[in-house]
Amino acid sequence: MKDTSFEIQKKIDEIYKNKSGEEKLLIALSMFETARELVISSLPNNLSERELRKALFLRFYGNDFSVNEKEKILTNL
């Protein structure tokens, strides 16, 4: 779905084109941290650190791996 007009997208692209690599990296890191916080807020509060790592992995990357690969990764988290 694309709900941004062509003119606005051009302005956004121009803004990002003029940012330094460091600024772009900081924006990406901030976006990831926000997404992480949103996911954590949707999980039960009583998860152990290990359970939290597993839940985050599954939410972010669960569709990117086969069942066998996920089992191996989850075993090591």
Image (cartoon, helix red, strand yellow):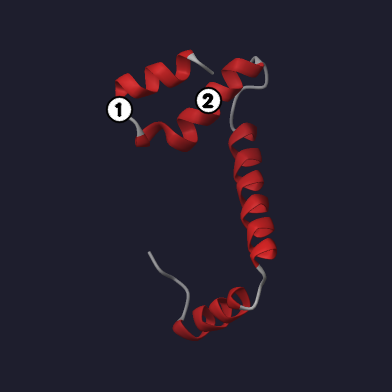
The quarter of the rendered structure image containing the C terminus is top right
Q: Nearer the viewer, mark 2 or mark 1?
A: 1
Distance from label 2 to label 1 (Cα)? 16 Å
Check the image and report above or below for 9 versus 22.
below
Residue at point 38%, 23% (across, down): 70
The quarter of the rendered structure image containing the N terminus is bottom left
* Residue 74 falls left or right of residue 12: left
Do the residues under discs 2 and 1 have CB atoms within 8 angstroms? Answer: no
Check the image and report above or below for 8 versus 71.
below
Check the image and report above or below for 11 versus 19.
below
- Residue 8 percent coordinates (x, y): 53, 81
- Asked where in the image residue 27 lies, by quadrant, the reply is bottom right
- Which class describes the residues within 10 Å of circle 2: few (<14), some (14-19), or many (20+)? some
Please, what secondary structure does the residue beneath circle 2 have? helix
Q: Which residue is mark 1?
A: 66
Q: Which residue is mark 2?
A: 55
- Residue 38 percent coordinates (x, y): 62, 41
First in sequence, mark 2 or 1: give its number: 2
* Residue 67 falls left or right of residue 35: left
Please, what secondary structure does the residue beneath circle 1 have? loop
Residue at point 67%, 21% (across, down): 45
- Asked where in the image residue 28 lies, by quadrant, the reply is bottom right
- Residue 12 percent coordinates (x, y): 57, 77
- Asked where in the image residue 16 lies, by quadrant, the reply is bottom right
- Residue 26 percent coordinates (x, y): 69, 57
- Which class describes the residues within 10 Å of circle 1: few (<14), some (14-19), or many (20+)? few
Q: What's the residue type where badge 1 is placed? A: Ser
Extreme-bottom residue of the structure = 7
Q: What's the residue type where badge 2 is placed? A: Ala
* Residue 30 falls left or right of residue 56: right
